[in-house]
Amino acid sequence: MRMHATVAPALLVPAALTLFLATACGGGTGARTTSATAGTATRAAASPTGSPTPAANGVERLPAAEILARARKATLAAKSVRLHGTVREDGEKVGLDFRYSGTDAAVGDVTFSGQRISLVRIGRSVYIKGDDAFWKGVGGAGAVQLLSGKYLRTTPKDRGFRDLANFTTRSKLFAEILSPEGTVRKGKAATVGGAPAVALADGTGGLLYVATLGEPYALRLEGRKEGRIDFDGYGAAVTVQPPPASQVVDVSKLKP
């Protein structure tokens, strides 16, 4: 499975933002805030659903390709889910922690090299907030002065931010990382987070664990050297709200 696909965009972020910030900071433009949003990005705690113990789904008896197809379908169709873990690419360690609600709402963080980027997605708006270490790394002191404590507001289709915004687009991200490289083969039964599962392996030696009770959700993705991603919190309440207007800088107002 393509765990590295989640990492590459994060590592490319500094290059894309450097070009943008060179213009924004060099032109002496002050931060302009939007006026149409309010609230904060929050995550509702998961609560027990009280549902009965799920029944066996029998996927372990299916061919590997069919198990994978069912896992992708169930995982993409889930009302909500959390993705979190650590991935490595070219020696870089990247932490991911995202919660998704429906098809166009998400909130989470990307961490790497001692820096943090927080993202909020609501419909066609994507809010990006870096910590001061991140802004300094990509734009120097001018970027920190302009954007410290602020969210950039952009869209999933903005070419300068599209790779980063893809972390908040569940359909694209999950379809990519749940795509095998080479032939998929069925592995052994396992237990992931207390849930019974069956393992699938691809040509890279990566393992995807699929639930064998209830919906055949993806539960864990392990790479031989790339790290591990867990999928959990299926069906848990997730509340995603836009940041306060005073903390938002609209990218379209800063571009030349």
Image (cartoon, rainbow, N blue to C red):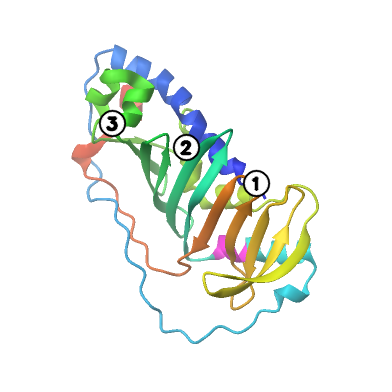
Q: Residue at x 47, y 27 (%)?
A: 160
Residue 223 coordinates in the image, percent (x, y)? 63, 50
Position of residue 7 in the picture relative to residue 82 (left or right): right
Asked which secondary structure carries label 2, the reply is helix
Q: Secondary structure at mark 1?
A: loop
Residue 221 placed where, x, y %?
60, 56
| Alpha carbons under labels 2 and 3: distance apart | 18 Å
Between 178 and 205, the one nearer to me in the picture:
205
- Taking the image as drawn, is residue 255 in sight? no
Q: Which label sits in the foreground, 1 or 2?
A: 1
The range drawn in magenta is 73-77
- Side of 56 relative to 201 (left or right): left
Which residue bears the numbered disc 2?
164
Q: Amino acid at mark 1?
A: Arg
Q: Is residue 34 above or below residue 203?
A: above
Q: Place residue 154 in its image quadrant.
A: top left
Foreground mark, 2 or 3, reads 3
Mark 3: which amino acid?
A: Asp
With 65 as the anchor, is 238 left or right in this view?
left
Compute the Cα span from label 1 to label 3: 31 Å
Q: Which residue is mark 3?
A: 132
Residue 26 vs 32, above or below: the answer is above
Pointer 1 residue: 2
Count of picture labels: 3
The image quadrant that residue 67 belongs to is bottom right
Q: Which mark sits nearer the N-terminus, 1 or 3?
A: 1
Q: Position of residue 95 (x, y in %)?
A: 45, 45
Q: Amino acid at mark 2?
A: Leu
